[in-house]
Image (cartoon, rainbow, N blue to C red):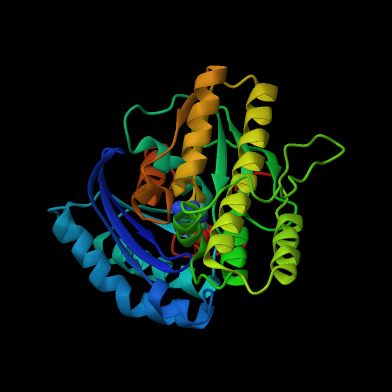
Amino acid sequence: MLVLGIETSCDETAAAVLEDGDKLRSSIVASQVSLHAEYGGVVPELASRRHLETILPVVEKALRDGGVTLGDLDGIAVTQGPGLVGSLLVGLSVAKAMAYSQRLPFVGINHLEGHIFAGFLQEPRPTYPFVALLVSGGHTALYHCPEPLHYRLLGKTRDDAAGEAFDKVAKLLGLGYPGGPIIERTAREGDPKTIPFPVAQFSDGAPDFSFSGLKTAVSLFVQKHRPLTPRLIADISASFQATVVKMLVRRTVRAALRERARRILVSGGVAANRPLREALQGEAEDRGFEIFIPPPALCTDNAAMIAAAGYARLLAGERADLTLNASADLKLAE
Ligand code: KG4
Ligand code: ZN
């Protein structure tokens, strides 16, 4: 079965062709980073306009690179939410038009479910049940996944998402946008033990996350130590990153132990972070968990993961109709 995936929820215009749920024929991602960089974050109006200009060339390239024509497809999967509504509508409109004109079945996919399905695009593939840590620019949450297409929310951030914290701290340090990859690079020259930033704790012991206190601590430190030297910027980056990694690893391990889960899947843009990947791998080896983290290009936003989730839903008989609408705050589970 050949599925075309389309993703336009934020600032990447992406399309991919996937065969039988796990054989990736093509995956095209057109990044808008340079468009938004000078504003220090994604500007929704600019994002939707750029999606509009880019979506058809991106879909055509995905089909061409995948060695297929529209007529070869068996179905279409498109991100329905959560995300920027104007951006989502671009992908949805194209998916609907193609599905209608080609008489193809199509499904709307929750972007977060897409991130989870990125874990099924490499060997070895996870088996159910597992605990999933989803860490991106808009979301930071833990889910229990007992069987395909079922999710239970275990814990989530009480304020900022992890990726958002990376982006805000990078801005504070004058490093640019997007913050995650820049902080990771800057931190390589620094010592993570220089500044003992606090890891938020909750008295109720919930496997929730919080990053706003850490962001404030970094901001206060920066104000006190101006002007910052490159050495200090590297040390702050390394100390901040180590604190985020510690929080993510601790809560994930706690949730997995509580659920008696033997497998952990980690995905979303921040899962591209090497120190986080290494810390999770180390913890998994020590405690005997099996860990699944997609390669970095599949952790950040892409359409291959949307096609993978779409394959599972189409196979389960799910069909959307032309009334399918974008949903900015679509939930994966309560
Ligand atoms: O999943 P994603 O591409 O988009 C959303 O669904 O939000 O995640 C983007 C987020 C951004 O906040 C970015 O700074 C962060 O992921 N990110 C990273 C790294 N690469 C991307 N954070 C830390 N380290 C990285 N290497
Ligand atoms: Zn994402």
> With 45 as the anchor, is 211 left or right in this view?
right
Q: Residue 170: image x %, image y %?
A: 56, 66
Depicted 181 relative to depicted 86: above or below? above
Q: Residue 141: image x %, image y %?
A: 63, 45
**Which residue is at the far right?**
203
> With 283 as the anchor, is 16 left or right in this view?
left
**Quadrant of the snapshot with the N terminus:** top left
Depicted 18 relative to depicted 302: above or below? above
**Which quarter of the picture shows residue 13?**
bottom left
> With 262 as the anchor, is 204 left or right in this view?
right
Q: Which residue lies at the image location 80% right of the left edge and 41% below the top edge?
A: 201
Q: Which residue lies at the image location 61% right of the left edge and 57% below the top edge?
A: 236
**Which quarter of the picture shows residue 314?**
top left
**Quadrant of the snapshot with the C terminus:** top right
Q: Nearer the viewer, residue 144 or 94?
A: 144
**Which residue is at the far left?**
67
Number of on-image labels: 0
Question: Would you say residue 195 is visible in this rendering?
Answer: yes
Question: Would you say residue 320 is visible in this rendering?
Answer: no
Depicted 171 relative to depicted 306: above or below? below
Q: Nearer the viewer, residue 143 or 103?
A: 143
Depicted 286 relative to depicted 194: above or below? above
Q: Residue 61: image x %, image y %?
A: 19, 64
Q: Which residue lies at the image location 54% right of the left edge and 58% below the top edge?
A: 234
**Which quarter of the picture shows residue 151?**
top right
Q: Residue 186: image x %, image y %?
A: 48, 59
